[in-house]
Image: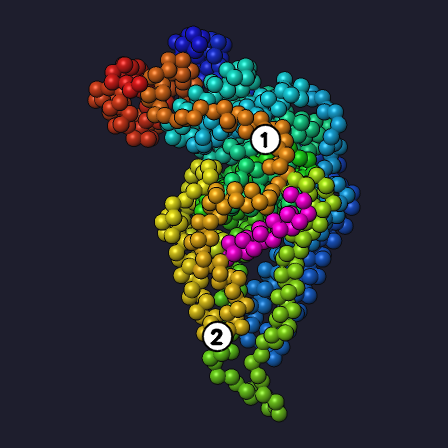
Amino acid sequence: MDTLGESARTGADGGFGRGPGGGGFRALPDESPMGMATQSLSALPLTHGRPRTPVTEPALMALRRLAVIGSATLLTAYGAYEMNRVLNSAGYSVLGVVVLVLFVLLFQWIALAFASALGGFVSLLRHGGLGLGIAREGPLPSLSSRTALLMPTYNESPGRVMAGLRAMYDSLAATGRLESFDFFILSDTTNPDVWVEEEAAFLALRAATGGDARIFYRRRPVNTERKAGNIAEWVRRFGGAYAQMLTLDADSLMAGATVVRIVAAMERHPGVGLIQTLPEIVNGTTLFARMQQFAGRVYGPLIAHGIAWWHGAEGNYWGHNAVIRTRAFAEQAGLPHLPGRKPFGGHILSHDFVEAALMRRGGWAIHMVPGLSGSYEESPPSLTDIAIRDRRWCQGNLQHAKVVGTRGLNWVSRMHMLMGIGSYVTSPMWLLFLLAGILISLQSRFEKPEYFGDTKSLYPNWPHVDPQQAKYVFIVTMGILLAPKLLAYVALLFDPAARRGCGGAVRAALSVLVETLIGGLVAPVAMLIQTSGVLSILLGRDSGWNAQRRDDGGVPFMETVRGYWVYTLFGLVLGGCAWSVSIPLFLWMTPVLLGLVFAIPLAAATSSRDAGQALLRVGLLLIPEETSPPDILRRAAAANAARPEAEGGEAIHLLLADPALMAAHRVMLPPPRRPGDPINPDLLVGLLKLAESPNADSAALRLGRTEKAAVLGSADGLARLDALRGSGLRA
């Protein structure tokens, strides 16, 4: 490790350790800049002669889209006709029209999902979902270009992140194609203790793999534009050296063979800009996470195959586990700031949809390959955690209202954005539909009827909601809503390996039933959570940016009570209103009321690891990746098991206790401040506190989080810490 100290003493290349003066240690390779201009949403881009319809577009795509959208439209028209008979058979009323409009909007949503699922069912039975000449099995293709695997991280557990990277590194090494790949850890971490721990874990990963020449680390001191800005900064500095980049999340895993196959497909098809895999959810331990991963594993392929079946070369991007042509991204995906203030203005939060749409606008094909296995991610462990993430996604999707009108977008790309918006606005619409239905019942219960109107007639105008017709519409609606689950189960029966991996046909059926029942109870709570999120965004409240929790999800019970009592109260009030109208109405609403009234125990039970493991022991909610883990998951589990039991620590003590880490940290410092650059007040305060601290322990206690980050990012700050070395340093 002497070379680390030598590199630090030589002051390599402005502190980044990337130039020839960097000695033996270099955290980053030589820069290879690539221009990435900000795109205009009001002007057409240059397409450089690329064809309007990509050559990789599957055959008969127009007919597929007509089948899906046409059948959804016909179903919606039929549903509207039948619902109109239920509500307005004896004449129109304001509430009746409101309920009818809401029903049509909501019904077309589930009708489109149903029609898309039918396409997915056909694709699954035909073993489709690939295309682009990708083979599921057989010899791996050779590669002729270089690809960068990008792992953005933000205040994540460094040990978990590096364990995943270690598994992917070893998996790629096993393919014999490792020389075609480099790994970049792109940190946006703001917690200084996690930052220094990241650096130590990075050095340990290099030492364990011998990957000094292909594993790199960079931390941005300022998190401009969050993850999108993180990736864009890498493209502008290093993108010129890599034909492709593989984007990951902190919980992503991809098998080496899967990576090689999609990169080879990108090399074979120069008009393709992005290939998105279907990440399967794994490693769930709580009941909620295991429900998510079972649903993703059993229903997810049907949904994804359906999307791929009729989207074709106008696919979408989910932000991770996808390979992207670097030139296409740099040429078309430079995101502008949206006009106005937050939460709708500013930088684009849900950048992935927009980046895919802009690349497609520029003539690049965007494909999804759900039939290729070996792509994985994890789920938030509880309803509370997914609600926090959902709040950020909600804001990002609602922002797309300012992007959907972008000039030159493909109509399918506009549909992606509208469907993203719809996935959140449907929650307040369901709530309004529910409340309006109760109001109609209340009106018929308490309002004095007008038996004879202005028109002379021998017969009275009785207020009338046809109960038999309403029951029929309800059954049809529920059938269309639940049909994709049934189709997914039938498709599972035709896949012997997946069927065995889910515990067999009977256990899989019981698991579908358990997931449907518990999911049905959670649904009204999730509806209110999403509704409150939409309302808070409309009121101008920004979601912020918080690190996602990825542990077992145990939430203190009183915290659950504080978070969910309002849903219980709402359920009691709603139930009281229904009871006051009629007992049959109350019974019809029981599924919704049960979920709301028992929101607190439901949230507590689903976040429980014990509940999740109890179902695992009896063979329910099983997925094949649990019963027979693939190689990449075994590698990741082994790397996680090999992590030190005691991780973390205070940054100042870590640096002062490890001269080699301190030397590497110096090399990785950002460039020093130049005359005219903004003055960092946190650094000034931090340096003053260091000057007044008698020892290292005192300094660690006195510095605030932002002050410590500023001090550790400054050569002056490190010099003052060096002066405290050995002065009261805890062992």
| Nearest the eye: 391 or 632 | 632
Q: Is residue 593 above or below residue 158?
A: below
| Nearest the eye: 527 or 44 | 527
Residue visible at 47% across and 24% down in the picture = 643
Residue 150: name its quadrant: top right
Left or right? Give the position of 103 relative to 692: right
x, y (%) of residue 289?
52, 43
* Label 1 crowd bin: few (<14), some (14–19), many (20+), radius 10 Å: many
Residue visible at 56% across and 33% down in the picture = 252
x, y (%) of residue 144?
69, 20
Per the rendered image, the range of residues in magenta is 503-524
- The residue that label 2 is drawn on is 581
* Label 2 crowd bin: few (<14), some (14–19), many (20+), radius 10 Å: some
Q: Quick one: SS at disc 2?
A: helix
Q: Is residue 155 above or below residue 570?
A: above
- What type is the residue that disc 2 sits on? Val
Where is the C terminus found, in terms of image quarters? top left
Q: Quick one: SS at disc 1?
A: helix
- What type is the residue that disc 1 sits on? Leu
- The residue that label 1 is drawn on is 633
Left or right? Give the position of 501 relative to 452: right
Q: Is residue 102 visible?
A: yes
Q: Mark 2 or 1 closer to N-term? A: 2
Q: Is residue 505 magenta?
A: yes
| Nearest the eye: 272 or 41 | 272
Q: Are marks 2 and 1 in contact (CB under 8 Å)?
A: no
Residue 265, label in figure: none
Where is the N terminus found, in terms of image quarters? top left
